[in-house]
Image (cartoon, coloured by chain):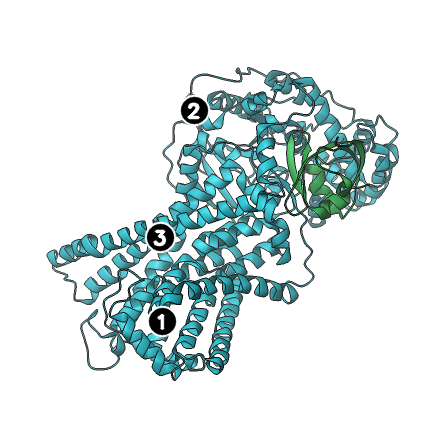
Chain colours: A cyan, B green
């Protein structure tokens, strides 16, 4: 195969980099959510491919409007967003593939991107790839483009951040870039929806061109990697083309390079027949490549030091192509540009201020999810308990069902109460997601990961794991979802198992109530101790897991791209918040409503004292009370073997928010509206704990608080864990939580009651 | 020398990447290829370095610095 010219003039109409008018393509298309990615609904599929932080998802949102679906790719745990993109008179499906730096995958997300692009045997393969290229970081982005061009899918480049680059004195000429890379290049500003119309026209044109000329696989041209590589690739390509089972499934050029560099995709060959000749040829070809490479026009100084690795040779040749393209299309104002983003970094990541700033930001997140969220949550709660509850009650009476029967009770105390509980999560989750989006969109998140990396390493986790753990102090549910920022599956699993030990804000309300009742002026100290214990548990259980279930795990070194700081936009933050919130309501909704209904049913079914009407059965005489009574003796060694306490722990399994309410219910006391003042609940709690602990009241309460800290946080967390790490690991995690909670609680009481 | 010997404001040329294949691959796709000029922009609170690799800004920890063999081109004043 001869070296191809890299400047084939296929570039068509290129709009000016700064169109002044919003493009007409970006109106939202009515498109209801779908269950899974459905290949049959559109006449073509377009995939968005790009590095992380290049504005890919923003572009996706701009071209699809808000109507989109986020879900697992069929058969995978990789989350992919799909939507409809209107290209003039036709609608295509657009898939936002996970961000990746190369087509040499190191995570399941990257693997999906790679497979969809190269594997013709895979359902859902895109008809065209829009490669999103960041103009302010052109070289690195072109490296991925170089690989995508080998995949045999028609490509259109969307050039983002042209303005950011210009602000740094880097002038990217889109037209020249298009000529140099050999595919259409369209500048876009997704945040302002500029250039979307031109991009849509270009994509439509490329799609019809591909349809008219057959799939562009045959023309999978790749980039010119220079002579020794091209000759070796061509020879191997001939062998691949002569093996139908292989040639039908993979682009020959891509596979040849993958085999030469021992890339992870070479493993695909194992499933296919008649590959012996190819396998036999690879080592010879690789030797040829390595031996020939250094002598041939070294792309970069230092080439010759690397003589033992075909992968390095190919990577260097790709970068040589990249540098050629950059030279042809970019004008720079200066050599070493110091951006204002660099200046901010001098402060925010510095030795002196990095950590204090980080702690300040985390304190802000924490305050917002506790102090700011609390009044919103209680306001919503009283709205639901008051007007909404009585409204539904009135309606039920009006239609003749009433509120006393099973049906009315089920609606009012199951459905309405369950939905109500779900809705009180909304302000908290909304605040949390806004903060996450702000941190992410501004670029600070990456800095924070860098600043705390070393400390997180002490507990065997990478710096990025700080985020789910910190978020967990607000609520464990988004924290579990946040483990997705970890690229390593085992790290993700380990972090997911540790998140439940992070004491969340729901647990805080119970601590505050109990501490105020039992510890008076030392209440603050008792609550603080719970936070210290929580951190200790995360560290110790993390160490324990790494010594047992996660033995032999190699650490992932920190290599982290820091995107330039930028001002977060309301649109991006709003959309991200809404998407995550909707996702949360969908996942957690069913489980929470079902469990609330189940608890109501348990507490309504009488087992003693004759048949009461549902909802009027005293808790003590209900199935719920009987169950609590049955398990109460298990807590006797911890000093609180009483059914009031075990009933509270039972509902605490559903949601920690329900613990205080259950105490109130079991004592037939009014639920305190302010946990700082327990009202009539206080003396009854004191009486119970004093009785069960044989006088060591304070120690028993501490033991109870410790159990509350360490056992399963809530059903919503369990649901989130199941979605992330599967049923088996979720159950393993729950087993560990219950064991740790019980043992620790018993230890606290047994040792504590000796001392006090 | 490796990157651990560099200080903020130093410029260095990357010679070779050591370490396992996985790590080399990750570094190469981020722009760390032999011959690339690395500028040290700053040092983090825990000893890692903040680098300019072309137009990208990349944070690396001490262990990664050890794997990056470089030649110093221009030392900080």
- Residue B31: x and y in percent read 70, 34
- Mark 2 → mark 3, Cα distance in angstroms: 36 Å
Is A36 on the left or on the right of A222, as rendered? left
Quarter of the figure with the C terminus of chain A: bottom left
| Residue drawn at the location 64% of the way across and 51% of the way down | A454
Counting residues from the start of the chain, the first of labels 3 and 1 encountered is: 3
Identify the disc placed on residue A425: 3
Pick whichever, A290 or A361, lies toward us: A361
Asked if the residue at tag 2 contacts the one at tag 1, i.e. Cβ–Cβ closer than 8 Å, the answer is no
Counting residues from the start of the chain, the first of labels 1 and 2 encountered is: 2
| Chain under callout 2 | A
- Residue A456: x and y in percent read 60, 54
Identify the disc placed on residue A754: none
Counting residues from the start of the chain, the first of labels 2 and 3 encountered is: 2
- Mark 1 → mark 2, Cα distance in angstroms: 63 Å
| Residue drawn at the location 48% of the way across and 71% of the way down | A741
| Chain under callout 3 | A
Pick whichever, A525 or A614, lies toward us: A525
Q: Which residue is mark 1?
A: A518
């Amino acid at each position: 195969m001869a070296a191809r010219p890299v400047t084939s003039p296929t570039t068509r109409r290129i709009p000016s980099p700064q169109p002044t008018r919003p493009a007409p393509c970006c109106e939202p298309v009515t498109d209801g959510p779908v269950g899974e990615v459905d290949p049959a609904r559109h006449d073509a599929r377009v995939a968005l491919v790009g590095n992380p932080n290049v504005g890919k998802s923003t572009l996706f949102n701009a071209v699809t409007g808000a109507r989109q679906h986020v879900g697992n790719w069929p058969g995978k745990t990789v989350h992919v967003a799909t939507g409809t993109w209107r290209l003039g008179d036709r609608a295509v499906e657009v898939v936002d593939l996970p961000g990746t730096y190369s087509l040499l995958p190191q995570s399941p997300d990257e693997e999906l991107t790679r497979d969809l692009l190269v594997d013709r045997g895979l359902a859902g393969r895109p008809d065209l790839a829009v490669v999103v290229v960041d103009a302010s970081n052109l070289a690195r982005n072109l490296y991925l483009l170089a690989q995508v061009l080998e995949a045999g899918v028609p490509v259109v480049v969307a050039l983002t951040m042209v303005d950011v680059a210009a602000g740094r004195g880097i002038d990217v000429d889109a037209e020249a870039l298009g000529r140099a890379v050999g595919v259409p290049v369209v500048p876009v500003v997704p945040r302002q929806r500029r250039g979307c119309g031109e991009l849509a026209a270009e994509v439509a044109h490329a799609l019809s061109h591909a349809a008219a000329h057959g799939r562009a696989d045959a023309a999978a041209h790749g980039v010119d990697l220079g002579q020794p590589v091209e000759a070796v690739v061509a020879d191997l390509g001939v062998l691949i083309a002569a093996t139908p089972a292989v040639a039908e499934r993979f682009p020959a050029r891509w596979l040849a390079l993958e085999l030469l560099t021992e890339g992870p995709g070479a493993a695909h060959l194992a499933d296919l027949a008649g590959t012996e000749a190819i396998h036999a040829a690879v080592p010879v070809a690789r030797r040829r490549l390595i031996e020939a490479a250094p002598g041939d026009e070294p792309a970069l100084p230092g080439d010759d030091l690397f003589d033992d690795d075909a992968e390095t040779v190919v990577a260097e040749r790709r970068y040589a192509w990249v540098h050629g393209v950059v030279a042809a299309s970019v004008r720079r104002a200066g050599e070493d540009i110091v951006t204002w983003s660099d200046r901010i970094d001098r402060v925010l990541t510095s030795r002196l201020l990095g950590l204090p700033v980080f702690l300040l930001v985390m304190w802000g997140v924490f305050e917002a999810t506790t102090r700011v969220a609390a009044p919103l949550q209680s306001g919503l709660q009283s709205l639901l308990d008051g007007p909404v509850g009585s409204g539904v009650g009135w309606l039920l009476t009006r239609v003749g069902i009433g509120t006393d029967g099973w049906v009315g009770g089920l609606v009012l105390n199951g459905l309405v109460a369950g939905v109500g509980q779900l809705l009180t999560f909304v302000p908290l989750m909304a605040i949390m997601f806004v903060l996450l989006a702000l941190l992410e969109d501004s670029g600070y998140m990456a800095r924070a990961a860098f600043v705390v990396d070393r400390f997180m390493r002490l507990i065997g986790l990478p710096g990025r794991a700080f985020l789910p753990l910190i978020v967990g102090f607000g609520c464990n549910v988004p924290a579990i979802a946040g483990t997705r920022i970890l690229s390593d599956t085992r790290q993700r699993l380990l972090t997911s198992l540790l998140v439940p030990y992070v004491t969340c804000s729901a647990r805080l309300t119970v601590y505050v109530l109990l501490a105020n009742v039992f510890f008076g002026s030392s209440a603050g100290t008792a609550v603080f101790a719970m936070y210290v214990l929580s951190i200790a548990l995360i560290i110790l259980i993390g160490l324990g897991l790494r010594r047992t279930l996660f033995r032999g795990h190699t650490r992932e070194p920190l290599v982290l791209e820091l995107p330039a700081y930028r001002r977060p936009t309301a649109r991006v933050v709003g959309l991200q918040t809404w998407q995550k919130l909707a996702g949360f309501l969908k996942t957690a909704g069913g489980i929470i409503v079902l469990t609330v209904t189940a608890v109501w049913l348990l507490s309504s079914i009488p087992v003693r004292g004759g048949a009461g009407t549902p909802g009027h059965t005293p808790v003590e005489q209900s199935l719920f009370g009987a169950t609590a009574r049955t398990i109460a003796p298990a807590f006797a060694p911890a000093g609180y073997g009483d059914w009031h306490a075990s009933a509270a722990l039972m509902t605490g399994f559903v949601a920690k928010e329900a613990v205080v309410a259950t105490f109130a219910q079991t004592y037939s006391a009014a639920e305190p509206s302010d946990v700082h003042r327990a009202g009539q609940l206080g003396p009854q709690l004191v009486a119970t704990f004093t009785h069960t602990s044989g006088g060591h009241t304070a120690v028993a309460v501490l033991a109870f608080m410790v159990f509350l800290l360490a056992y399963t946080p809530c059903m919503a967390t369990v649901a989130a864990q199941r979605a992330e790490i599967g049923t088996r690991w979720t159950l393993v995690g729950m087993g560990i939580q219950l064991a740790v909670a019980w043992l620790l609680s018993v230890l606290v009481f047994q040792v504590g009651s000796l001392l006090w | 020398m490796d990157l651990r010997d560099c200080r903020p404001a130093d410029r260095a040329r990357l010679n070779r990447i050591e370490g396992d294949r996985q790590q080399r691959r990750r570094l190469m796709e981020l722009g760390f290829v032999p011959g690339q000029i690395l500028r040290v922009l700053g040092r983090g609170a825990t000893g890692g370095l903040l680098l300019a690799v072309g137009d990208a800004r990349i944070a690396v920890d001490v262990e990664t610095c050890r794997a990056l063999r470089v030649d110093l081109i221009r030392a900080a004043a």
